[in-house]
Image (tube, rainbow, N blue to C red):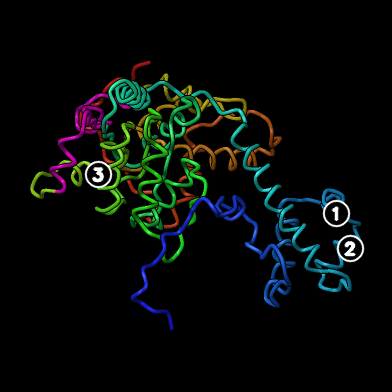
Amino acid sequence: MRDTNQPRKAPNLDNYKDTEARRLLVAWRLPERGPLSAEQRRDLPAYIKKLVEEWGCPQSAVAKQIGLSGPVVSAVLAGSYAGDTDAVLRKLNIWAETEARRREAAKRSAPRGELVRCHVVEQFIKAAELIAVEPGIALLYGPSGIGKTACCEHLRDTLPHVVLVTITEGDTTFQAFRAKLARAIELKGYRPRAGHVSLTIDERILDHLRGTHWILVVDEAHRLMMRARRFLRDIVDKSGVGLLLVGTVELRDLVTADCKPDFGQFSSRITLCVNLAEGKNMYAGGDRLYTMDHIRRLFNNRLVRLLPDAEREIDRQINALGFGSVRRCLTLVRYARRVAVKARDLDANSQVAIGAADLRAAEELLATSSDVMPTLPAARAPVAATA
């Protein structure tokens, strides 16, 4: 039994090997030396075989890449190899990680469509320019589906000093968020593990960011718990980076309420607070968030051409804030094209003219219940669509 009176030594994070510290995409963490466990020998071949099949890689090509013969790889994956199975599994494990990273890099480097410079995009660019010059906290919030995540990704891909962290359901706690942030800033030597000293890790993150003049963009920030928001506040104060928080209206309520001291300390540091949909609800007598010109540039491409009646229907739906907006319409047009290609027996790669009838057919296909594709409200007064 360990003597609890002995002082615990702080872990030396610099001693961790890079292979252990980095974020693995698909590979298993295997011991560098010694035999593999019975479970690893049993389950890893099936896992590698599944990846090979999903990626469409011939086993002969995989074998050539790792310097082995095709029969050896086939025998290992089938569990019938009589030689050094552990050595081959280690090579296959490394190959799987290398291939996964190559595929991820290919996705990131693939040409992206032109981002339509609408109101939402302009607000994101202005906020990024502001906190790049005067580091602080900028808050951008709005209803679901209006393109916030696409704008965050656009800033990351076009500005070299932007770091994007997207919060998912599993990242809401402080520990999970801190781990994701460390990976996003490529902090070497960091691996969350029981017994690590939190202060050491926090200080390493702050030291890594200090003086960089980066912009930290946190998407879905309304999911973060209080301790994670406090840590972000400390990062801005102590490292001098700019912070762009993006989320729903719930985020505004969380960080601007002065009824509690912790929230008040956060709100006093906010340089810019923007409601992305303010005055843009045409169903409440406001302007359109997306004009007809935006709609044509968003949806017309080499595969799709919207007919006039489809443009009017998309205009009705894309400007219905809180009903999915852009996300809803992109899904609808994608399914409408599938329906039209099948109904008209068209070539899968040809441009398809989509009409309102095609959109209605797609909506019926998607609406397995009234909760999936809800009925949109009627505008209070007809407003002519502007180009």
In contact (CB < 8 Å): disc 1 and disc 2: yes
On the image, numbered disc 3 is attached to which residue? 251
Determine whether, in the image, residue 127 is placed left or right of residue 67: left
Mark 3 and mark 1 lie on one chain; the one further toward the N terminus is 1
On the image, numbered disc 1 is attached to which residue? 63
Above or below, comparing residue 47 to residue 253 in the picture: below
- Circle number at residue 72: 2
Residue reaching furthest to the front = 6
Disc 1 crowd rating (10 Å Cα; few below 14, some 14-19, many 20+) is many
Give whichever of 289, 161 is nearer the camera. 161
Give whichever of 259, 29 is nearer the camera. 29
**Picture quadrant where residue 48 is located:** bottom right
Residue reaching furthest to the left = 259
Answer yes or no: is residue 162 visible.
yes
Disc 3 crowd rating (10 Å Cα; few below 14, some 14-19, many 20+) is many
In contact (CB < 8 Å): disc 3 and disc 1: no
Give whichever of 275, 23 is nearer the camera. 23
**Which amino acid, by three-letter code, is at mark 2?**
Val
Mark 3 and mark 2 lie on one chain; the one further toward the N terminus is 2
Magenta segment boundaries in residue numbering: 262-290
Determine whether, in the image, residue 241 is placed left or right of residue 115: left
Depth check, mark 3 against mark 2: the one in front is: 2
Q: Say which element carries label 3.
A: helix
Q: Residue at x 26, y 34 (%)?
A: 139
**Which amino acid, by three-letter code, is at mark 3?**
Leu
Q: x, y (%) of residue 291?
A: 36, 22
Q: Residue at x 50, y 44 (%)?
A: 362
Q: Say which element carries label 1.
A: helix
The quadrant of the rendering that contains the C terminus is top left
